[in-house]
Image (cartoon, rainbow, N blue to C red):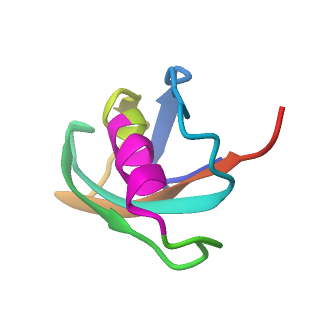
Amino acid sequence: SYNLKGFKVSGKPNIQNERQKFGIIVVEVCVNKQGKIISTKQGRGSTVSDNYLYSISERAVRELAIVPQGNVSETNCGSVTIEYKAN
């Protein structure tokens, strides 16, 4: 799920969870007014502290198309939540 006020997030990243690890990872993301990602970090709300899951989550977030919807600030921060569960 996406929580980035003033922006539309589209696309669904291709995530390869080759290690079959499970949990919820929250990636805090900051974008500029054009929607370009300027920073990411692991956010509050993650149910696991796993470097592998965070790494593939961050990569997936950077693949998203983030488009401003109207007048937005120079820097805008929000989060993307990705849940990894058993098939």
**Is residue 17 shown to the viewer in this render?**
yes
Q: Residue at x 27, y 38 (%)?
A: 35
Question: Which secondary structure class fits the magenta region best?
Answer: helix
Residue 21 x, y percent position in the rendering: 62, 50
The magenta region covers 50-59
Magenta-drawn stretch contains 52: yes
Can you say whether 15 is above or below 26 in the image? above
Magenta-drawn stretch contains 25: no
- The quadrant holding residue 12 is top right
Closest to the observer: 83 or 52? 52
Q: Residue at x 50, y 35 (%)?
A: 8
Residue 64 x, y percent position in the rendering: 40, 29
Q: Residue at x 33, y 47 (%)?
A: 71
- Report the residue that reaches farthest toward the front: 19
Closest to the observer: 28 or 23? 23
Q: How many marks?
A: 0
Closest to the observer: 37 or 24? 24
Residue 32 x, y percent position in the rendering: 19, 49
Residue 55 x, y percent position in the rendering: 35, 49
Can you say whether 17 is above or below 71 in the image? above
- The quadrant holding residue 56 is top left
**Is residue 68 shown to the viewer in this render?**
no
Q: Residue at x 35, y 27 (%)?
A: 63
Q: Is residue 21 left or right of residue 67?
A: right
Can you say whether 80 is above or below 12 in the image? below
Closest to the observer: 70 or 67? 67
- Report the residue that reaches farthest toward the right: 87
Q: Is residue 64 left or right of residue 3?
A: left
Q: Is residue 15 left or right of residue 1?
A: left
